[in-house]
Image (spheres, grey):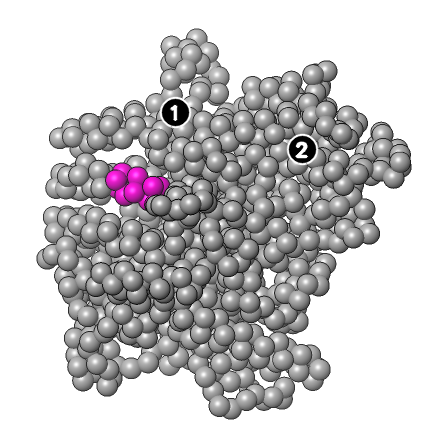
Amino acid sequence: MTMAARAEGDSVMRPSTFDDCSADGRTYVEGAPPSLSAQSPMESAPPSSSTAATAGSSLTDQQVHALLDILSHHETYAEIEAFKTPDAVTDYGYPFSRTMAPGLVQQPQQQQQQQQPSGGLSGWLRSATSTPLNSAPGTPRSRTPVPAADQDAASNKGSEGKTGNDDGDKDNDGGDSGTPVLQALLTGFLLPLPWLRDLPRGFWSVRVQGILARLGAADLSESYDKGALGTRKMLATGSSAVIEMLGRGALGGVPKKRAPTSGAGKDDDAGGEASSYDVNKPEDLQRAWDDVVQQLVYGDLVDDIFDHIARTDDFESHSPAVKAAAEYTLIHLAAFAHRVFIGSPEGQYLLKLLENVHSLIPYKLIKQTLRVGNAATMINGMMRLLLAKLSVTSVTNWFGITQSPDDGMNLLQRIVSLVLGWDAGEFRKVADRIEKDKASPPPPEDALRIIREHVAASREEHEIVRRASRANGQSIVVAILSSASEGGAALLAQSGGLTEEQHARCLEYYSALLSVRDREAIAAALCKQAPDLFTQAIKDLVAAYDPMIRSVHARVDIKEHLDGAQGFIDDFIRASKPTKDAGAATTTERLAGVDEYVELLRRNKGLLYRCVSAVASRCDDVWADLREWTKAAVRKFRKDEDEDGDARRSMEARLRDMFADLEGEETRRRVLQAIDAHAAYLTTLNDLSSARLQLLVTTAAAAATNDHEASSADLSSTGAAMMEGPGVYLARWQALLDDTLITPAVPRRAGGALRCGRDVKHTVAMGKTGAGGMPASTSKKTGSSDGGHGGGGGGSRGGGVEAPDVSIVVEALGGPFKELVRERARGLRGLA
């Protein structure tokens, strides 16, 4: 998740690199952004309280809920954005190393001057294609293989490194983490996974850490520079919205509401709750989810479900509560997928990447390999198919003629490189077109030259120019030209500087160059740098999962389930592409609504149920290991309110203490005012989410009874409502995007104030195309009421409700909260 969510935005927890826009349009430099909160499928609405707190009294339950929401939201997003630099990996703590293994990442000692061909951009980019590392300053340029002893020094610790206790003296595994929320979730839930826990320490401290550090050192561009919200920014904010929900549940615990029964929804008398749930009523879906969570965390529902799946592939026949909770989960998954691929301006671009990768996967060869009866032979054949490197260098290395570490790419790396290379080619076309543009007035040649030189500059120069642009309210293009040692200032002084049209073309040019450089840097980190950490990481994973693979291969027809997965991806891509309304008089294309995604998942959920049931019923050893891990994982969501000791006190009590310890009556008053505003904001978003859930279930019920007339009437009366799914976290996600700073659109400060993400919510970077080569922007393809865009609109995402400014809360309590998270994280690891 972390690598995929590498952010393009600005750091939240690090004042030196962060600015953000507030909900009320103000700009906060070197401060904390307004925080949003959301209700997730794992969280209930904020508890209400009739007793209002004052600045001198304790917080109510509703205020504590809002405070936890603010601080966890801010902390999680700050930790994700910290991975823009390699320091975040070494500061992460266990299972990563506090120091990098030698040779994995080499910071450039000095910037090498690029020899630019007289042909301008074309020759420069062609050179970048053949030597990608040179075109990506700041990207590690290691050409010397790491000695085996250095690479696997941590790996030799074997299982000793898994708990972090045996080598803590050498690597300070028990020390504080700079990203405690992410570390708590990784060490508390992922590392104990069966088979994953058998990985050598070097997998994390060498392979994964090396890849993350390479990406951090690559100095990837930010949304601010490009004048549009990018794909990495969208994925980073979306990851934060999901991770923070899990973090709140794990660190704060799930409140125990009533005595658990033997099975959710099976006991009519338990807690006074009825055992029937109407899937066409949103309140019943929410109640079923809450009941199932209670039984999973405090009851014995885990064993019940594991036993049930082993008996039948009809998962939802377990009980009415499980059936309704499954429907509730499916709707939220559909809303999340719709937000990624339809609601975002980057959605069609992401769909194109997915389609390209899907088309390059050799499904036929994989299926033929899976037919091999002997498990060892099958695994060996699959490894050769996916990881074998076929190149002249690999052959000469095998014969001993050469000893070059750069021995080509395997199939997986070739797929990554091809997809990113095709993508970079589209941006090269944009840059070449601007270079050759003779329209009146064309961009000055000196301006384009200075921009090319700046792209090839170091991270430090990029940050200096970016800070100057924000501080002076200048466009990033003007800041680049002003910082140039030759020609830039004179160019700006001539005839009043750049015209708005010239400035727009220069900004597009800069964005295209950055896009090319980013993709080459990512491809280099994963596919072209030595040592090949990516391939070795895959080998480590296969070796760790070897017992599970052998067990499943011997008892389950994997090919059958692979066929189902391939068909689902085909179906998903078809459903996500724009379509023309049958019989429509215009050529306007329509994008799928959330209800269509719900139907898509309903049609295909049986594939997942059958696959899981096949493993459960035939692979007892695998199923037993997964059962024990699941039971241990859900126990970590329990609240330990009865235990003594400050570290084990409830999260609510600690938050109340933090508020009570604030110095100054005025500070407490302002903090309390912000908390109250945020609590009211949460309540409003919860109501909006419930209304959208009601619309979805009503439409689904009408479709199920063939009441097409009623369904059509609902759609026509709600307009763009079907383009919005339930889940308050979607509003939080969009608000993070809306608050991202974007460079001014005009060259001069007058009228060129810094923009925010909400100002460019329908804009995609030049050169990005969707599936089929169509423009990636979806703003013209749907008849929604928010300006013709089915998603991405800040107002529509929050129903027109703006998030309050809670920066005072983060400033006053952000530091103590981080220390509190570190304490709770140690408890999840078993070190407290």
Which numbered disc covers residue 509? 2
Q: Quadrant of the C terminus?
A: bottom left
In this view of the protein, which residue sits in the foreground, 29 or 86? Answer: 29
Distance CA(mark 1)–CA(mark 2): 33 Å
Q: Relative to 283, is 145 above or below? A: above
User: Is 403 situated left or right of 198 in this image?
Assistant: right
Q: Nearer the viewer, residue 763 or 153?
A: 763
Which x, y percent locates residue 119? Answer: 69, 16
**Who comes first in sequence, dot 1 or dot 2?**
1
Residue name at image x 78 percent, y 47 percent: 474
Q: Residues within 10 Å of mark 2 (few under 14, many from 20)?
A: many
Amino acid carrying mark 1 in the image: Asn
Q: Nearer the viewer, mark 1 or mark 2?
A: 2
Give the residues drawn in magenta, as a range.
Answer: 565-575
Q: Is residue 372 above or below residue 641?
A: above
Which residue does the image show at 29% across and 46% down from the upper left?
195
Which element type, helix, strand or loop, lies under badge 2?
helix
Which residue matches tag 1? 410
Label 1: state its secondary structure: loop
Residue 33 percent location from the top left of the image: 63, 62
